[in-house]
Image: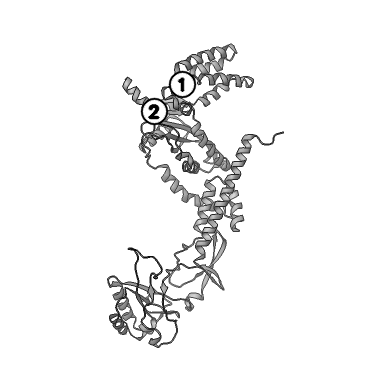
């Protein structure tokens, strides 16, 4: 007994490959983030926190000391933006600066000004505006600030003069390691990273909020974690599986509500992609279809149609034109959909391929009056099979395929008449009626180059995307609203369009150009 069919084995192998690639990708993201954050991790007895400050190469930096002797804090060249071993270029800025300590400010600003006048060759100044013990050397509105034993107004004037000096870079240093108002008070905050949960000790400052350049205020998850969660969801991983994966990778679960909130951020980018201008030039062949999904509407569940359009541009490449909510695939929905596509740049349509939908047929005639309609032969066959006994489906299928295997439209019509007569002889009157009434609209492809026939007589190009969409939407089941259903469909379309699907040439459009030229000459 066969447990798995050949098709199921292929699907299983494909799923295993995708899962393996996802694991490898997540592992690379984890390693990259560990390497990035490792540079800024600071380990202390109280825990681990991150700090990102501008690193300056210092030469002969004097050691900080509480002594009041000015000679312990000399005016020295201490800053250099690059060493002699580093490569330099036209955009490289060489910094030569001087260090002004709080001790020098306490001894008098006039001496600092005199030292600056006597010095030359500097283009940067590093000035301490706060001592390690918490004394401020500039005017501040912080309630608990300790005023320094110095002329604060004179210090403010000096800082103002330095900042207003042309071509001079002024760097203010604010030590806080021995400040009792800084280190004695803090609160703990958990941050989920690709390396697991990290406890951050955030300073609790009075009168001023603490912010870092690495982590935004109130952030609970690292940006790479949020990106991974969004990509997992959009790639087809269910919410329950996302919870299990996050617990296995990072030791903590992420709630469904969190994933929903993160997806709202992704929806903004998806909506921009959905409404992008079409820049593929002219689109001779357009494929359309409707996908039905279940959604919640006023406490009740109903089916909603998502209209999807794909085209082959004048260069022969496939392109996803767009998707929109279409309710019940009525005429008004299709007209709005086609007009929306035209407004974004859809032009040069010669043939529209799709299943037989009266609303769509009427809309094509109004919006694209010069375009022809090709009914998908596969859907046509299924419609005929619906009135044929199962025992005779294989025989009827061969008869129908023989119609579309002819070398010309005339030969196909003659073959269709013979098939209709044979079906009636087999007492399949309903099937014969369907073939007789619908065969003509399945032969429109014969008006185009024979090299394109196999690709334009069916809707198979869009069925591949439909399977990808249904694979993802099947996991969700019922959507809370129509917008979430539309966004997920567009997310899958954008994902597929970004693969080889959209980068591989689908047709040689020179055959169509030659046929159009011959037609114009004949006309």
Q: Residue furthest front?
A: 85
Q: Which mark is residue 512?
A: 2
Q: Is residue 198 left or right of residue 127?
A: right
**Classed neighbour count for the residue bearing mark 2: other residues with Cα under 10 Å, few (<14), some (14–19), many (≥20):** some
Residue 353 higher or lower than 16, as above or below: above
- Pick whichever, 485 or 173, lies toward us: 173
Q: Position of residue 187 (x, y in %)?
A: 53, 69
Q: Which circle, 1 or 2, is nearer the viewer?
A: 2
Looking at the rendering, in which quadrant would you find the N terminus? top right
**Classed neighbour count for the residue bearing mark 1: other residues with Cα under 10 Å, few (<14), some (14–19), many (≥20):** many
Quadrant of res 247: bottom right
- Do we see residue 114 in this rendering? yes
Q: Position of residue 25 (x, y in %)?
A: 54, 52
User: Which residue corresponds to mark 1?
Assistant: 443
- Do we see residue 482 in this rendering? no
Please state the total of marks drawn on the protein image.
2
Q: Residue furthest right?
A: 1
- Pick whichever, 39 or 68, lies toward us: 39
Q: Secondary structure at mark 2?
A: helix
Q: Position of residue 333 (x, y in %)?
A: 43, 33
- Pick whichever, 210 or 242, lies toward us: 242
> Which residue is drawn at the image coordinates 50% and 75% (left, top)?
183
């Amino acid at each position: 007994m066969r447990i798995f069919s050949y098709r199921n084995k292929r699907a299983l192998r494909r799923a295993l490959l995708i899962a393996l690639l996802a694991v490898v990708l997540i592992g690379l993201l984890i390693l990259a983030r560990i390497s990035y954050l490792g540079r800024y991790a600071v380990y202390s007895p109280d825990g681990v926190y991150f700090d990102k400050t501008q690193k300056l190469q210092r030469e002969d930096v004097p050691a900080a000391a509480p002594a009041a002797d000015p000679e312990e804090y000399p005016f020295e060249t201490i800053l250099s933006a690059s060493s002699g071993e580093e490569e330099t270029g036209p955009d490289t800025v060489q910094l030569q600066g001087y260090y002004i300590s709080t001790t020098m400010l306490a001894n008098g600003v006039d001496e600092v000004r005199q030292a600056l006048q006597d010095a030359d060759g500097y283009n940067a100044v590093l000035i301490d505006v706060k001592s390690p013990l918490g004394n401020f050397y500039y005017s501040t509105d912080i309630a608990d600030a300790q005023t320094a034993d110095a002329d604060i107004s004179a210090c403010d004037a000096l800082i103002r003069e330095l900042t207003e000096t042309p071509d001079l870079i002024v760097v203010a240093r604010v030590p806080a390691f021995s400040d009792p108002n800084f280190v004695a008070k803090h609160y703990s905050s958990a941050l989920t990273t690709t390396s697991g949960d990290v406890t951050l000790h955030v300073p609790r400052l009075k009168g001023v909020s603490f912010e870092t350049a690495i982590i935004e205020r109130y952030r609970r998850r690292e940006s790479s974690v949020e990106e991974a969660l969004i990509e997992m969801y959009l790639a087809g991983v269910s919410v329950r599986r996302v919870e299990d994966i996050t617990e296995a990778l990072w030791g903590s679960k992420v709630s469904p509500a969190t994933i929903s909130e993160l997806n709202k951020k992704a929806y903004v980018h998806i909506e921009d992609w959905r409404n992008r201008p079409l820049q593929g030039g002219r689109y001779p062949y357009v494929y359309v279809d409707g996908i039905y999904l279940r959604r919640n509407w006023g406490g009740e569940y109903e089916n909603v149609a998502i209209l999807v359009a794909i085209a082959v541009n004048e260069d022969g490449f496939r392109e996803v034109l767009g998707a929109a909510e279409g309710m019940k695939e009525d005429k008004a929905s299709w007209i709005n959909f086609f007009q929306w596509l035209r407004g974004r740049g859809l032009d040069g349509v010669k043939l529209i391929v799709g299943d037989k939908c009266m609303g769509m047929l009427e809309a094509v005639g109004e919006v694209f009056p010069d375009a022809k309609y090709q009914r998908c032969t596969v859907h046509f066959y299924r419609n005929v099979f619906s009135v044929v006994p199962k025992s005779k489906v294989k025989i009827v299928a061969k008869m129908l395929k023989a119609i579309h295997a002819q070398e010309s439209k005339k030969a196909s019509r003659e073959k269709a008449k013979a098939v209709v007569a044979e079906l009636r002889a087999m007492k399949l009157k309903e099937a014969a009626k369907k073939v007789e009434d619908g065969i003509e609209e399945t032969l429109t492809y014969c008006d185009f180059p024979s090299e394109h026939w196999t690709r334009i007589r069916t809707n198979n190009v869009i069925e591949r995307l439909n399977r990808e969409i249904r694979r993802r939407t099947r996991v969700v089941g019922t959507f809370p609203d129509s917008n979430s259903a539309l966004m997920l469909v567009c997310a899958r379309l954008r994902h597929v369009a970004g693969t080889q699907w959209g980068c591989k040439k689908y047709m040689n459009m020179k055959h169509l150009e030659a046929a159009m030229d011959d037609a114009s000459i004949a006309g």
